[in-house]
């Protein structure tokens, strides 16, 4: 009887289905992100419930003006690269005695400082070409709102064909010399790159002049963006408009020193108003996002204005800090527009990831 009972028990155990697998616990990082997101939404006065939100996109004309302006002002860095390259070679071919240079830029000092804080050396990235991201805007600008302004469409398409090719060659040359690849091929590739660069450099001024002839008047005609802006957004966009006039003024063949000075006084007043708005309305994105870039632009433009007043001819390397700061200011204002739309839709602030340090040089 005991034997039969034991056999029955073992048989029943064998036929029983296995217990269901236990559900995995939610990862701690997921819960942490949820709590952080809820706190961020609450801090910005938004609904903390988790629900999908449809965020409206920026309108096509806003995207077009953003891309076209950053393309135009950012492309001025090509002149700095050209002058540095030709000057470093002094008419000679690339060789061990004549290693080409592609210029020194104000962004380099900030990059080296960040590397220093991290305990690392900037190396080749500390000699990067920070304007290349703006050249990429040219390719995007030519695809937006095609047919609305035939003259603008034509000139940006032509310039992109030229600038994208030159930009690619410059990046290739930068990698070639930073990585010291010439030590392996005895400057064979360096000679090919030299031929392509010198050929493109010969028409750089003409290409930029053609772009400026159309984009300059277009930029001066720009009005407010299509989106409804809050007070901080209106002040920031006003600051960008004044800064744009300064940028166009210093790029003119005969800069109007008095007009640049008047515009500087005007932009400082807008800066003060934007700073007050940042205090009175701390949740508005424009004052917070735009203010650092605006300060950088005013600093660079003030120094350039002093050089203009001296009556000396400005070199591209002297103009670049102002045009580069202007392109970054336009970027910041555009980014603030996106933050504003997210807030209006109840989506909360964007979680911005800090890019790797080396990406800042490209």
Image: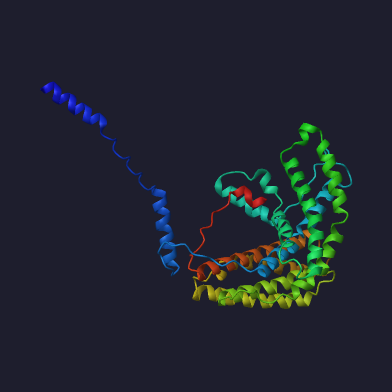
Across and down, in percent, residue 208 comes to 82, 62
**Residue 30 place in picture, x, y as percent:** 41, 51
In the rendered image of this protein, does residue 267 appear above or below residue 189? below
Q: Quadrant of residue 179?
A: top right
Residue at x 61% of width, y 52% of height: 113
Residue under the image location 72 percent in, 62 percent down: 141
Task: Give the total number of marks visible in the rendering.
Answer: 0
Q: Can see residue 96? A: no
Nearer to the camera, 80 or 172: 172
- 6 relative position to 280: left or right: left
User: Residue 192: image x %, image y %?
Assistant: 84, 41
At x 74%, y 63%, the residue is 73
Question: Is residue 32 in sight in this rendering?
Answer: yes
What is the x, y in percent for residue 169?
78, 47
**Along the line of sight, the residue nearer the viewer: 91 or 200:** 200
- x 77%, y 44%: residue: 173
């Amino acid at each position: 009887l005991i034997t039969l009972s034991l056999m029955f028990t073992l048989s029943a155990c064998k036929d029983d289905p296995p217990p269901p697998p236990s559900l995995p616990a939610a990862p701690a990082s997921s819960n942490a992100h949820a709590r952080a997101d809820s706190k961020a939404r609450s801090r910005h006065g938004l609904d903390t419930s988790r629900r999908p939100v449809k965020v409206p996109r920026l309108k096509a004309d806003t995207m077009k003006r953003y891309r076209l302006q950053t393309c135009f002002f950012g492309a001025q860095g090509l002149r700095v690269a050209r002058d540095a390259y030709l000057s470093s070679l002094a008419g000679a071919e690339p060789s061990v005695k004549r290693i080409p240079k592609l210029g020194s830029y104000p962004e380099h000092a900030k990059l080296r400082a960040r590397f220093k804080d991290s305990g690392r050396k900037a190396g080749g990235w500390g000699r990067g070409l920070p304007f290349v991201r703006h050249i990429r805007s040219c390719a995007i600008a030519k695809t937006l709102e095609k047919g609305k302004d035939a003259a603008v469409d034509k000139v940006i398409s032509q310039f992109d064909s030229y600038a994208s090719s030159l930009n690619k060659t410059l990046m290739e040359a930068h990698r070639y010399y930073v990585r010291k690849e010439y030590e392996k091929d005895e400057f064979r590739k360096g000679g090919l790159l030299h031929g392509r660069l010198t050929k493109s450099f010969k028409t750089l001024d003409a290409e930029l002049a053609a772009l400026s002839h159309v984009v300059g008047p277009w930029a001066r005609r720009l009005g407010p963006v299509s989106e409804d802006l809050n007070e901080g957004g209106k002040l920031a966009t006003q600051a960008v408009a004044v800064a744009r006039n300064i940028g166009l003024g210093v790029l003119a063949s005969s800069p109007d020193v008095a007009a640049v000075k008047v515009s500087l006084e005007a932009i400082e007043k807008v800066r003060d108003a934007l700073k007050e708005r940042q205090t009175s309305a701390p949740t508005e994105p424009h004052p917070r996002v735009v203010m650092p870039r605006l300060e950088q632009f005013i600093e660079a433009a003030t120094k350039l204005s002093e050089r203009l007043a001296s009556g000396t001819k400005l070199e591209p390397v002297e103009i670049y800090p102002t045009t580069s700061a202007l392109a970054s200011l336009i970027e910041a204002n555009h980014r603030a527009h996106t933050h504003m739309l997210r807030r209006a839709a109840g989506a909360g602030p964007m979680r911005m990831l800090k890019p790797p340090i080396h990406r800042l040089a490209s």
